[in-house]
Image: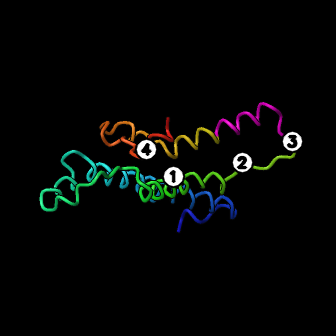
Amino acid sequence: WKFMQGGDGSDVFRRVVTIKFFTQDLMQQGLILAYLYSWYNDGGLRCQLCLFDVQHCDDEYAFHFGNLVLIGCTLFSSVCNQLLISAKNKKYYDEDEEVLVCFVRTAMLAASILPFTTGILTMQSHLLRLGPWTIMAA
């Protein structure tokens, strides 16, 4: 494999983690968004099941405990890349370099969860009903 050659172990590890982020984490965020939209939309699959079984139409919210665990683990997985990849070690960092490293890390954190947060914010408002979590959010 060409990308495995020409670097020490840490360079290869950075490449593998970056490939994992683009091939798994971003795709998984997109698939979760597609699931939430197709199931909890007004004309979604949950609504269509109500035509056959009225008991199926209880108040079910997109952010119930099972979905929150799924979302939390997915976002944690995409953010954990920052724990695995660190800046090159130097004996001395001046204040400007420390601020730059913190800024880059914060930008990477925001970029790693950007597809999911953008998708949630652009979904229709009825999907964002929090149900029992409304009291906690207020």
Instruction: Report the Cα–Cα distance between label 1 and label 2.
Output: 22 Å
Instruction: Report the Cα–Cα distance between label 3 and label 4.
Output: 36 Å
Amino acid tagged 2: Ala
| As drawn, 90 above or below 3 | above
Q: Which residues are magenta?
A: 93-104
Amino acid tagged 4: Pro
Find disc 1 in the rendering and name its residue.
75
Find disc 2 in the rendering and name its residue.
87
- Callout 3–callout 1 Cβ contact below 8 Å: no
| As drawn, 71 above or below 13 | above
Find disc 3 in the rendering and name its residue.
92
Total numbered labels placed on residues in the image: 4
User: Is 21 situated left or right of 5 in this image?
Assistant: left
Q: Residue at x 30, y 39 (%)?
A: 126
Question: Quick one: 119 or 131, which is closer to the camera?
Answer: 131
Find disc 4 in the rendering and name its residue.
115
Q: Residue at x 16, y 55 (%)?
A: 48
Task: State which tag comes first along the sequence, 4 or 2.
Answer: 2
Image spot of residue 84 (x, y percent): 66, 57
Q: Quarter of the image holding residue 7?
A: bottom right
Instruction: Report the Cα–Cα distance between label 2 and label 3.
Output: 13 Å
Q: Nearer the viewer, mark 4 or mark 2?
A: 4
Tag 4's secondary structure?
helix
